[in-house]
Amino acid sequence: MKTMHYLTTLIFTTITLISCVKTPGEGGSASIEGSVSLIRRVQINNPASTVDTIPASDVEVHIIYGNHTSPDDKVDTNPDGEFAFNWLRTGNYTLYVYSEDTSSTASPLPKIAFYFEVEIEDRDDVVTSAPFLIYDEY
């Protein structure tokens, strides 16, 4: 009887450990950092009308864990246009921000998303994303 109890406990523990697959998301010690810059133009669809490029403060940066279809988290950029997602596990992530569409002449201008794929390979990685460039009218 006692042997059966130990065997059952061993099988249950083994199944539990095998089924604990670590997927991308919160719960690790890695981070993704990056920045967002804002390019201001007099005429949004004319690159020659660029006035300046400044840090994009208070811009929402979204993150998708693994192959999820909707955003899992978001942070706002600081006054210097920087952001960080902390306490992540290894895996693939998608970052995106919204910007004014520079190819449109519609009024009001539609928003489009700019995406970057990021991979965390080691559990203590601090991965720096490529900088995002977004656009707005001056």
Image (cartoon, rainbow, N blue to C red):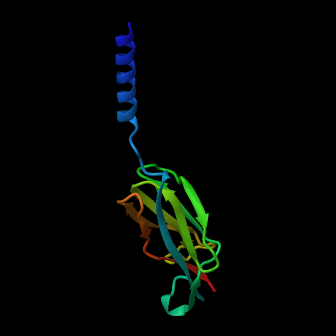
**Residue at horizontal 52 percent and vertical 82 percent from the top:** 45
Residue 73 percent coordinates (x, y): 56, 56
- Would residue 97 be found to the left or right of residue 13 on screen? right
Q: Residue at x 39, y 55 (%)?
A: 90
Say which of 110 and 81 sits in front: 81
| 10 to 86, vertically: above or below | above
> Outermost residue, front direction?
2
Q: Quadrant of the C terminus?
A: bottom right
Q: Of 69 and 72, which appears nearest the observer?
A: 72
Residue 57, quarter of picture: bottom right
Residue found at the far top of this picture: 1
Task: Tell me the residue at 46%/77% (across/down).
Answer: 131
Figure disc tally:
0
Q: Is residue 87 above or below residue 101?
A: above
Q: Position of residue 21 (x, y in %)?
A: 38, 41
On the image, the x and y values in percent for residue 40 come to 58, 85
Return the x and y of residue 87 as percentages of the image width and height.
51, 57
Task: Name the residue: 58% across, 86% down.
Answer: 54
Using the rendered view, name the quadrant where residue 52 is placed: bottom right
Quarter of the rendering occupied by the N terminus: top left
Which is nearer the eye, 29 or 79?
29
